[in-house]
Amino acid sequence: MRRPCLLALSCLLLGLSLPLAAQPAESPAPELLVTLTGVHVTPEALRPDLLCRLAVDIRNDGDQIISQLEFGVRLADSEIPVYRNQVFMEALPPGETTRVKLYNFWSTETSRSGPKGKTYPVEVTLRGAKWYRIEDVEEEGETIEEWTPLDEVQPLPPPLAVQLPWQPSN
């Protein structure tokens, strides 16, 4: 009578351990070589019909230049359409943080009112970027700068947002 119990217990234990052994090991997350480190809006307190400047700080911890930057910008939960078709060809050197100036924006427009609360969220997303090699090349007696695109930057950093004080009209 003991043997069937031991056999059943052995099968049960073996059956439970097989799925655990068959699971693939989790691979580590890929290293993030490009990060958004700051979103800057001037002025820092917003009200309706105010022209604002926008910039983002990008840290390049890779060993190549990055460029061909594609952004997404959300203001008070509205996506700004102009960024869907724009590419910024600024060269961001390795080992440095670079401030990239983005487009000015109006705090409110006819198609976009201000936020409902007391803060105005501004979110910047890096939607795409490429590694580049940029070198000076002699061509017909002239030195020209040659930009050679390499691979896509992967993984891309998560979006970065700031919450600015919002002063609605009275």
Image (cartoon, helix red, strand yellow):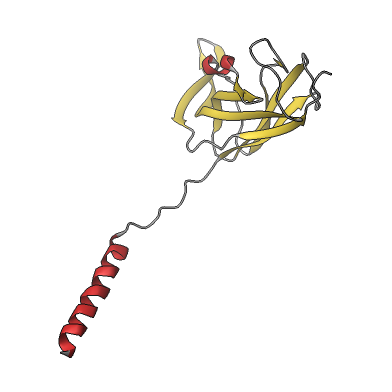
User: In the drawing, does residue 8 fall left or right of residue 30?
Assistant: left
**Image height check: is 93 above or below 29?**
above
Query: Could you tell me residue 93's position as x and y percent?
Result: 61, 32
> Quarter holding the C terminus?
top right
**Image height check: is 106 above or below 123?**
above
Count of marks overlaid on the render: 0
Which residue is rendered at x = 67% and y = 17% of the image?
103
Query: Could you tell me residue 55's position as x and y percent?
Result: 70, 25
In this view of the protein, which residue sits in the foreground, 141 or 16?
16
Which residue is rendered at x = 57% and y = 20% of the image?
89
In this view of the protein, which residue sits in the foreground, 131 or 12?
12
Which residue is rendered at x = 72% and y = 33% of the image?
163
- What is the residue that sits farthest to the bottom in this orientation? 2
User: In the drawing, does residue 88 fall left or right of residue 24?
Assistant: right
- What is the residue that sits farthest to the front in this orientation? 170
> Quarter holding the N terminus?
bottom left
**Image height check: is 107 above or below 44?**
above
Query: Could you tell me residue 97's position as x and y percent?
Result: 67, 35
User: In the drawing, does residue 76 fall left or right of residue 46?
Assistant: left
User: In the drawing, does residue 122 fall left or right of residue 135?
Assistant: right
Would you identify the image quadrant in which residue 162 lies? top right
Would you identify the image quadrant in which residue 92 lies? top right
Query: Could you tell me residue 5's position as x and y percent?
Result: 20, 84
